[in-house]
Amino acid sequence: MDPSNKRLPKSSEEKFRTFKYQPANIKHLQLFGLTVCSVIFLGTCIYAGSAAVGAVYELAMWQYLYGDEIFLLCHAAVLSVIMVLSIYATIYLLQDKLVAMPEGIKLPFHLQLFSPRKSIIPWSEILSWDIDGQAKQATLVIKTKKKNFRLRLSDFSTIDECQRFMIQLRAQCPALRDNFQPLLQLNSSLRSEPQSEGSRSYTELWMEGLQSKVSSSSSTPLVAGDRLHNNRIQVLDVLSSAGLLATYLCLYDHTRLVILREYRQLTNSTAAEKALEMLHREGELLLKLNHPGLAKVLDIFDEQNRSYLVMEYKEGQTLKEIVTVGGPASLELALDWIIELARIVQYLHHSDPIIIHRDITPENIVVNKDNQISLIDFGTANRFSSGSTGTVVGKTSYMAPEQFKGKFSEQTDLYSLACVAYFLVTGREPIALIPCALKAILPQIPENLDKLISKTTSQNPSTRTTSIDAFLDELKLIRSTIALQGMSKNVGC
């Protein structure tokens, strides 16, 4: 899964465009510069003023200016130029902002002194980042193609300002999007030193209070940096937002990456209350699930007229990404993945009550670096009761016909599983509402596998494979047969 391949929304980019950063030695230099400018300004005013008065007097008396008086005027002019330059230099030293621009990071003047002709670091030149040191001595190291830049974390105006800068940096820079470790290090080290209420500015407290009043009636999605659940959750990235649903990448308890599903309620109708009650009921059920192949649901809560589901973040690539980039999987690997996935679905279907996922697609299946499968996104999971109906959910290519009518059963998940198998072996998206025929694309595919996939994607649920146990048994038999025959080559087209 690569949740960071999306840029932050425009509103978020504007909100975190500038970041206050000012080292202590620069503050002293600024104070010195202001003092020098003040002294030069007063001296220049007195000196130039007396010279100008004398010159005006001589001219008023219709007398020629002598050499001493011309020298005084030139001297005053030079001092005036020096004064202007001093003010200009001090203004430059007063720059205390790191700016995240579309093309890269714009450095303040005092950092440009050590990198001549390089006021902007392009995003493409940033290779990696890391945090060196602990607590107040910690330094953010940004490694580029030409040199490394070190930003002392304590030189940011606040810890929150530092974190916002790092969130923006990760979101904008392609090379950093899969490396969350510095963010986790920041939270585990600096957050151990609580920020007292008195150290926060009145403006920060006022804005925080204002945000809580405005957000409660807003239907807009959250943005990076927003906090929820008594500050236990902080939004890092917006993964998707459509209608009343949104998905975010977040930090949980300042140390753990999670996926946050948001359900917005715009009305106070009876239907909305019923939907909220159902969400909580299903959430409580999902909290009890415990399987290594499932993204564990960690928490469920309501806040500001919205409901949230907190889920474990599973690191890796989705099957969609793997097949899109590398093409169809080998037949053996595809079967291994489907068997592993079927075991996960078997766990759900054997739960009490039965859990129907309803959205098994390549985008919701993650493979980690150890080649292990995980099923994610329980935003549409539901417990099963005979004859129940619900909303239409899922991706059309992987949806069983009954889902379009708001109905679901165990065979609904089996249908989606067979469609995923078709996608893995052929590299093609299945056609909605049409049984998957592997042999039509790959004539060399084993006959029993073709029949299993075709039967399981039947448009009539009663003619499909009866249960996940039967489906899994047939898959294992096909896999063992292929292993005996040595059919390990890629049969994809």
Image (tube, rainbow, N blue to C red):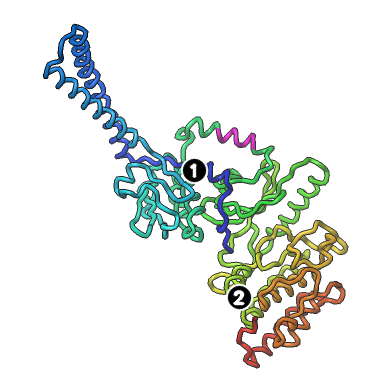
Residue marked by disc 2: 327
Quadrant of res 20: top left
Q: Is residue 56 magenta?
A: no
Instruction: Measure how far apart labels 2 and 1 are at the Cα level.
Output: 39 Å
- Residue type at tag 1: Arg
User: Residue 492: horizontal and vertical position, in percent?
Assistant: 64, 81
Q: Please state the extent of the stretch shown in magenta in the rendering.
A: 207-214
Image quarter of the N terminus: bottom right
Q: Residue furthest top?
A: 61
Disc 1 crowd, CA 10 A, few/some/many (<14, 14-19, 20+): some
User: Residue 94: horizontal and vertical position, in percent?
Assistant: 35, 35
Residue at horizontal 66 percent and vertical 51 percent from the top: 241
Labels 2 and 1 touching (C-beta < 8 A):
no
Relative placement, left or right, of 410 versus 17 is right
Q: Nearer the viewer, residue 182 or 65?
A: 65
Residue marked by disc 1: 17
Q: Residue furthest bottom?
A: 485
User: Residue 324: horizontal and vertical position, in percent?
Assistant: 61, 70
Relative placement, left or right, of 309 versus 50 is right
Relative placement, left or right, of 84 versus 378 is left
* Secondary element type, mark 1: loop
Q: Nearer the viewer, residue 59 or 450?
A: 59
* Secondary element type, mark 2: loop
Residue at horizontal 18 percent and vertical 10 percent from the top: 58
Query: In the rendered image of this protein, does residue 137 appear above or below residue 322?
Result: above
Residue at horizontal 20 percent and vertical 9 percent from the top: 57
- Residue type at tag 2: Gly
Query: In the rendered image of this protein, does residue 224 appear above or below residue 174?
Result: above
Mark 2 / mark 1, whichever is N-terminal:
1
